[in-house]
Amino acid sequence: MLESYRQIFTPSTALFSVTGLVARLPISMVGLGIVLLAEHETGSYGFAGSVSAVALIANALFAIPQGRLLDRIGQSRVLPAVITVWGIGLVLAMGSLRWDWPVWTTYACAAVAGAALPSVGTCVRARWSHTLADRPERLHTAFSFEAVADETVFLVGPIAVTMLATAVHPLAGLGAALIAGVLGTYAFAAQRGTEPPAHPPTAADGVRPPIPWAAIAPLTVVAAALGILFGAAEVVTVAFADENGRKSAAGFLLAIWAFGSLVAGVVSGAIVWRHGPLVRLRVGAFGMLLAMAPLPLVPSIPVMGVVLLVGGFAISPTLIATMSLAEQVLPPARLTEGMAIIGTGLAAGLAPGAAVAGVLIDAEGASPAYLVCAVGGALALVGALATRVPATVPSHEHAAPDPSEHLA
């Protein structure tokens, strides 16, 4: 099973993958860290949540322009600049809370930090696409590993920032995110040998190859649907555990869900599939809808753990197929930008998913609110079925497996 992973990892690819994992830790730490610090300093969850929301919105708005810069100028020039701005913005946001600056300064600094936070996961995938250009059949394994890395980030980050902020110091959680983000990104960007080439406009009119919207737009819908599902599930699972008299079990339930996705990502990456990413995307989205449908009917925490574990198995394969398909259809000159569009869709779905679920919880209770997750699964299937790929791009319906590999 590990042979597929051995074939993609060399000292250079392992180094950019590991440093990329460290560099993207802030994605799962900063939002919660801001909430913990702001609530500690002001006593208001409403204010804390609004500051975190400002950072998330700014990040979503600037992810696509930042991806365009990465494609045009190159990672080694853009990443050190934006992560430095991010670090300064985050330090000032922390200081504004700690030193009781005017409220608007906190919002402004949070917006700067959110806008500058780089999508390192997208940059890592772009590097894999570049380094495996002569072995494209290995990209599925590489993207599978990165999906597992993403799951690891979202397992470790929230736990670490909460423990540091509550057991050490309110600033400690964000401080750890700051160190990981800045040092990890500097180390990642310094690896010039694996960096994809920049693609500055060469024509006199600066025309670039078009983005294949018939594929990218539906894939962004799939990503947004996953965001709705994730945002709702986190909120509803806490309420479900609380209603069952064991609020502390919410973290355990969400960890089981993430663990199922992590395992599925590892296994998926070890297999060479007969079918290409378009087929896998549709099957994964359908499986996710089936997994989400029973959630409103689950009667107890132990049963919910089993259902969420099974549901997690559909997450990573769907995300992996989404990014693999995007990599195949996007022109190299717009690869990072196109993947950033999909990542923005995922981020854009989180807030409405959580908000709608919260309204339903207040009105009807936790179990009916799980219907938001089912709606997210249905929307993901609609996006998957609507995805169309250019006729000039080969091997979407069927993969081209290495005959020496085991087939699935």
Image (cartoon, grey):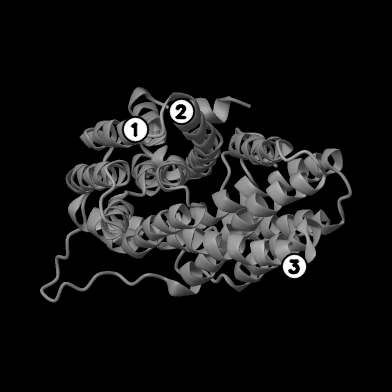
Query: Which residue bears the numbered disc 2?
Result: 164
Q: Pick the quarter of the image with the N terminus.
A: top right
Query: Which residue bears the numbered disc 3?
Result: 363
Residue farthest toward the left in the current orientation of the protein: 204
- As drawn, 310 above or below 188: below
Q: Which residue type carries mark 3?
A: Ala
Write the residue at 61% across / 46% down: 316
Residue 343, how many percent across, how many down? 45, 57
Task: Classify mark 1: helix, strand or loop.
Answer: helix
- Disc 1 and disc 3: Cα gap in Å? 38 Å
269 relative to 294 in the view: left or right:
left
Write the residue at 80% across / 57% down: 367
Q: Can residue 398 be seen at all in this image of the molecule?
A: no
- As drawn, 403 above or below 377: above
Mark linked to residue 109:
none
Q: Return the disc, 1 or 3, that comes first in the chain's sequence.
A: 1
Q: Return the disc, 2 or 3, that comes first in the chain's sequence.
A: 2
Q: Nearer the viewer, residue 347 or 367?
A: 367
Q: Nearer the viewer, residue 240 or 10?
A: 240
Query: Which residue bears the numbered disc 1?
Result: 175
Residue 218, how many percent across, how many down? 54, 70
Task: Classify mark 2: helix, strand or loop.
Answer: helix
Q: Look at the numbered discs 2 and 1 and tell me whether their residues touch, using CB distance below 8 Å.
A: yes
- Disc 2 and disc 3: Cα gap in Å? 35 Å
Q: Which residue type carries mark 2?
A: Leu
Locate residue 256: give its quadrant: top right
